[in-house]
C-alpha cells in the first residue's frame, strides 16, 4: 500500500469551540500517539485527509514541523448525519514492525444450486508489516454444497501476513435454501416473466394502432 503524505500543523487550541473553528477552516483535528511518545495534537488538511481515509488501513506519512512520522488511522470519528470527519486518532508505526489490523473479506463465485451463503465475518483480524498491509482477502464459494464451511485457517493470506484470530473462527458457511426462499424466488421470476409479456403485448398493440 502506497504512503499518502499529509502536512499537519501543531494544534494549541482545544475543546469543542476550537474543534468547530478548525473544521470551519476546512481542516480536521487529530492526535498522533504511540511508541511511548507523548500525544501530539495536530490539524490535518480536510480534503486530502478525507480522500486518504477512503482507503481502509491507509498508511499516512505525517509531516509536522519538518519531521515525518508514519501512522495508521486508529479511530475515525464522523458526524452521524452528515458523514464528515470530526476527529482522527493516528497510531505511530515504524517500518518493518508488525501491526494488528482488520482487513476486508470479499466473496466471489456462486455456491451450488438451492444453497445460501452465510457470511459470518466481513473483516478479519491479521498481523502484517505496517508498510505491507493487504487491502483484503478474497474467498471463493464457487460450487460449495450445503454444509460446507470456511474457517480462518482456510484463507489464503498474502506472504508475511498471519492470522490474529483463532484459526477455527468461522468465516463463511453454506446452508440449504429454505422452501420459502425457493418459492419466493420462483414467484419473483414468474412475476418478471409476466411483466415482460405484458410489456411486449403493449408494444405490439401500439404498433397495430399506429399502422
Image (cartoon, helix red, strand yellow):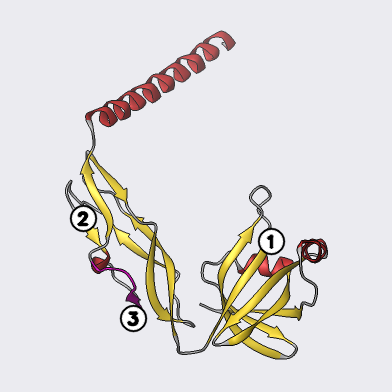
Q: Residues within 10 Å of mark 3 (few under 14, many from 20)?
A: few
For label 3, the SS is loop
Residue 134, x across and y down, in percent: 43, 73
Q: Is residue 8 left or right of residue 98?
A: right
Residue 92 drawn above or below residue 200: below
State the SS at label 1. Answer: strand
Viewer-nearest residue: 209 or 97: 97
User: Is residue 99 left or right of 119 when viewed as pictured?
Assistant: right
Distance from disc 1 to disc 2, alpha carbons, whole Å, reads 40 Å
Pinpoint residue 59: horizontal percent, then vertical percent. 55, 77
Q: Quadrant of residue 153?
A: bottom left
Which range is magenta?
161-167
Residue 159's label in the rendered image is 3
Labels 1, 3: front one: 1
Residue in view at x 56 percent, y 8 percent: 209
Residue 86 is tagged as 1
Amino acid at each position: 500500500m502506497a504512503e499518502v503524505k499529509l502536512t499537519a500543523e501543531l494544534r494549541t487550541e482545544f475543546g469543542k469551540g476550537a474543534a468547530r473553528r478548525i473544521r470551519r477552516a476546512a481542516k480536521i483535528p487529530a492526535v498522533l500517539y504511540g511508541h511511548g511518545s507523548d500525544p501530539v495534537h495536530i490539524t490535518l488538511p480536510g480534503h486530502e485527509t478525507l480522500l486518504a481515509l477512503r482507503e481502509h488501513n491507509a498508511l499516512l506519512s505525517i509531516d509536522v514541523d519538518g519531521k515525518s512520522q508514519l501512522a495508521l488511522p486508529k479511530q475515525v470519528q464522523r458526524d452521524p448525519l452528515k458523514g464528515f470527519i470530526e476527529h482522527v486518532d493516528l497510531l505511530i508505526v515504524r517500518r518493518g514492525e508488525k501491526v494488528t489490523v482488520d482487513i476486508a473479506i470479499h466473496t466471489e463465485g456462486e455456491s451450488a444450486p438451492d444453497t445460501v451463503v452465510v457470511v459470518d465475518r466481513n473483516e478479519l483480524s491479521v498481523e502484517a508489516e505496517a508498510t505491507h498491509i493487504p487491502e483484503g482477502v478474497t474467498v471463493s464459494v464457487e460450487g460449495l454444497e450445503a454444509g460446507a464451511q470456511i474457517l480462518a485457517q482456510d484463507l489464503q493470506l498474502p506472504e508475511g501476513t498471519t492470522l490474529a484470530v483463532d484459526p477455527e473462527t468461522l468465516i463463511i458457511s453454506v446452508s440449504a435454501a429454505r422452501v420459502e426462499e425457493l418459492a419466493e424466488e420462483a414467484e419473483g421470476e414468474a412475476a418478471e416473466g409476466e411483466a415482460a409479456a405484458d410489456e411486449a403485448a403493449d408494444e405490439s398493440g401500439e404498433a397495430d394502432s399506429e399502422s
